Amino acid sequence: MEHLVARKNRPFSLSAWLRREREETAVLLRCIPATAVTLFVVSVVCMNLLANKTLVQTQWLALDGGILVSWLSFLCMDVITKHFGPRASNRVAVLAAGVNLLTCLIFYIASIIPSNAADYTALNGILGGTWFILLGSTVAFLASAALNNFLNWLIGSAFRKDPDGRAAFAARTYISTFIGQFADNFLFSIIVFMLFAPIFWDGFHWTLLQCAMCALTGAVAEVLMEIVFSPFGYRAVQKWKALGVGREYLEYIREE
């Protein structure tokens, strides 16, 4: 414990802070179940690809394909936040965003490599993606992830009598997902379909009402999906706790 006290009393050092961040992230990734990280990262990558397609567009509503899988991203964050805390969930969100950016880069490189084997125009268009969709989805995802994880932790801390019960898990999951998803969908819609789409897509755009209704409808849809699948998340958290999953990381942050 003496080295911990000494470390806390030292003046701030950027290099020391970066070293601690790398150390904590390394401990977390050793402890967190691979299935949770894999589902989280894959859902983020798929969400970015599916966002290129508008599924519904009316005068008051518009929905993109990302809504089909974004619920999984938030459920993974809720499970990770419940067991490991919001700081751990934020770290995994940054990791997922980084993997998504790397995936998009690889896809883009593949799309610009010429081939005379067949006509890959349609595939290249999908793989190449659109830079402002990637920008909008990354900014919206990271902002909403931080909001979701904080709210999940804050709501959970209000359940003092039975913090590990089903009611506590449901409340923290449903409320944080609704607000986080609304923020995600709204930020993404404004950035992509109000700021950049009118410039780069020949005037195509969504109205502010469509953005708001997309965010609201998407948030409602995601909560409904959470209601269906959150029991699996709850059982996963209970199993992690019973098996002592992540003990090394939990002790690490407790000492800090």
Image (tube, rainbow, N blue to C red):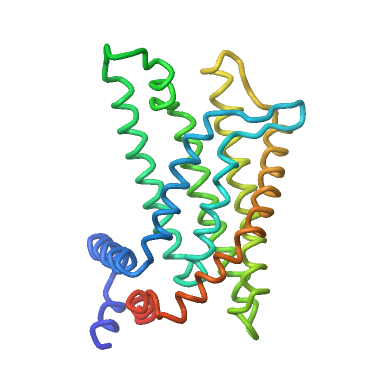
For the residue pair 214 and 37, the one nearer the viewer reads as 37
Query: Which image quarter holds the N terminus?
Result: bottom left
For this orientation, the residue located farthest to the bottom is: 2
Query: Where is residue 3 drawn, in percent x and y?
Result: 23, 83
Query: Where is residue 221 drawn, in percent x and y?
Result: 68, 47
Query: Where is residue 214 drawn, in percent x and y?
Result: 68, 38
Image point (69%, 53%), residue name: 224
Q: Quadrant of residue 62?
A: top right
In this rendering, the answer to whether 250 lies above or below 25 is: below
Q: Quadrant of residue 158?
A: bottom right
For the residue pair 192 and 12, the one nearer the viewer reads as 192
For the residue pair 95 and 147, the one nearer the viewer reads as 95
In this rendering, the answer to whether 186 lies above or below 244 is: above
Image point (39%, 27%), residue name: 127
For this orientation, the residue located farthest to the right is: 60
In this rendering, the answer to whether 57 lies above or below 231 is: above
Query: Where is residue 154 drawn, in percent x and y?
Result: 59, 69
Image point (63%, 30%), residue name: 55
